[in-house]
Amino acid sequence: MTNPVQKYKIEALKIVIAKTTDEMASAAADDAHKFLRAAISVKGNVAVVLATGNSQIQFLEKLTAAQGIDWSHVTLFHMDEYLGISADHPASFRRYLKERVEDKIKPRAFNYLKGDALEPIRECLRYEALLTTSGVDMVCMGIGENGHLAFNDPPVANFKDDEMVKIVKLDEACRKQQVGEGHFPSIEAVPQYAMTMTVPALLKSDKIICVVPEKRKAAAVKAALTGPIGTECPASVLRRQKHATLFLDDDSSSLTDFTGLMKSPPSSLIDLKEIRVQTPP
């Protein structure tokens, strides 16, 4: 990457700030590729959880376009899906990821969460079993306008959840975001419920890459980095995660005062000690 980035650390969380969204996406994709190459060399096969939404588009484009990853050794999962939506619905996260990721890189497998399953609770248990069996090496996530991680909105987020995948009711701010991003024509069209990986399930990996561009996310970023750690802003829990890196651009970081914060040393973002060989139970 030719353009410089600023690196900071708030509590345990590493932060990288790039000038533009494109530069931010490049930095995040480069970090992800370095980790995946190293993890595949150590473990053979790895598992990755991906996020969706407009904020992830450039990152996923760069992640799938770069050379050097043998995707036949990578099993993919995703974080969430609307309850009752079919895989061919324009707003389906399965459709989003099939078109933007699976069709481009041909992974070892892509395990999709079926929002239109006839027995949603059984589907959550099925997905939880898949995640437990494979383990998760890397999670690539974003932050919602209300501070959510996946569909763990403030009213339903639980940092000590004993489930890995659950059904939740979406709050109004989250549903408005889906309309604002152009996925639904009105808030009435947005499903009221969704399936989601829980906060503990998302944090239980060797590496977290959190990609958060755009001005509309600036208030959530500020709350996550400077407010209390709690479910009022679920993303605040990232400050406790030493294996997490938050990637921002000038817009998303614009409301947060980094003055006086310790800058991180100019070392590689990847740490090979992060990679652990996991033995499935």
Image (tube, rainbow, N blue to C red):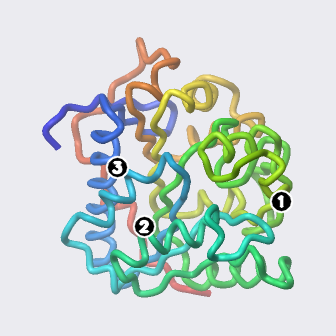
- Residue 181 in percent (x, y) is at 59, 44
- Residue 86 in percent (x, y) is at 70, 75
- Label 2 sits on a secondary structure element that is helix
253 relative position to 78: left or right: left
Q: Where is 263 relative to 203, above or below?
A: above
User: Looking at this view, is 65 or 96 the one in front?
Assistant: 96
Query: Residue lying furthest left in this view?
Result: 2
The answer to the question of whether label 3 and label 2 lie on touching residues, with beta carbons closer than 8 A, is no
Is residue 243 visible in this depiction of the protein?
Answer: no
Q: CA distance from mark 1 to mark 2?
A: 24 Å
146 relative position to 3: left or right: right
- Label 1 sits on a secondary structure element that is strand
Q: Where is 154 relative to 107, above or below?
A: above
Is residue 156 visible in this depiction of the protein?
Answer: yes
- Kindly identify the residue that appears in the image at 27 percent across and 69 percent down: 38
Q: Quadrant of the N terminus?
A: top left
Query: Residue lying furthest front in this view?
Result: 185
- Residue 165 in percent (x, y) is at 74, 69
- Label 3 sits on a secondary structure element that is helix
**Mark 1 against mark 3, which lies toward the viewer?**
1
Q: Amino acid at mark 1?
A: Tyr
- Kindly identify the residue that appears in the image at 34 percent across and 86 percent down: 72
Q: Which residue is mark 3?
A: 28
- Kindly identify the residue that appears in the image at 73 percent across and 43 percent down: 174
Mark 3 / mark 2, whichever is N-terminal: 3
The answer to the question of whether label 1 and label 2 lie on touching residues, with beta carbons closer than 8 A, is no
Q: Which residue is mark 1?
A: 193
Q: Amino acid at mark 3?
A: Ala
Q: Which residue is mark 2?
A: 100
